[in-house]
Amino acid sequence: MTVFERIKEVSKTRGMSLLQLNDKAGLKKNVIYSWKTKQPSAEKLKAVSEVLGVSTDYLLGKTDNPSVTTKPKEVDIEDENVIMTYEGKPIPPEDLEIMKRFLNGGTGNDKK
């Protein structure tokens, strides 16, 4: 399987078109499609792998394990533009407030 075919397969399982993936990775128009006939640069392949949540080695066919072994993504619990999830479901705002109080040294049962 080629790099292009792997990218196409993974993006499909993620519910994303190659055009959407191309945009989310910050690439110029139709860059991913050009990989049908040429190898991607390491920098561009890394951008695509980060959007897809797989390792570059997986996209290159060096491993069948798609796991990314880089450091975990860090987010600020105060960032309202980030949707926090648990078991694939968004955490309700009320529960996030309880979590914030707990992390700040409260018990989570404190009243405001």
Image (cartoon, rainbow, N blue to C red):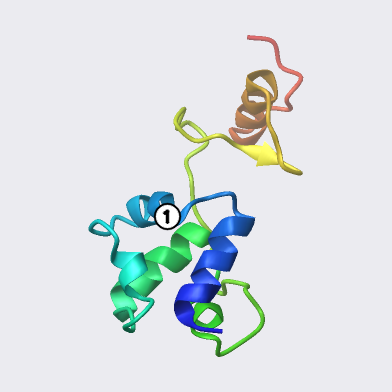
On the picture, is 29 further left or further right than 53?
Answer: left
Looking at the image, is 85 positioned above or below residue 96? below
Q: What SS does tag 1 mark?
A: helix
Looking at the image, is 73 positioned above or below residue 66? above
Residue reaching furthest bottom?
62
Q: Position of residue 64 (x, y in %)?
A: 66, 83
- Among the 4 quarters of the image, the one containing residue 102: top right
Residue position marked by numbered label 1 in the rendering: 21
Give the position of the N terminus as an image quadrant.
bottom right
Looking at the image, is 64 positioned above or below residue 75? below
Looking at the image, is 11 positioned above or below residue 37? above
Give the position of the C terminus as an image quadrant.
top right
Q: Position of residue 73 (x, y in %)?
A: 51, 56
Q: How many marks?
A: 1
**Nearer the observer, 32 or 75:** 32
Can the viewer see residue 35? Answer: yes
Q: Give the residue at x 63% y 33%.
A: 105
**Nearer the observer, 86 or 30:** 30
Q: Position of residue 54 (x, y in %)?
A: 55, 69
**Mark 1 closeness class: few <14, some 14–19, many ≥20 residues within 10 Å:** many
Q: Position of residue 43 (x, y in %)?
A: 30, 74
Can the viewer see residue 71? Answer: no
Which amino acid does the dot numbered 1 rest on?
Leu
On the picture, is 97 further left or further right than 18?
Answer: right
Q: Give the residue at x 63% y 72%.
A: 67
Q: Give the residue at x 36% y 57%.
A: 22
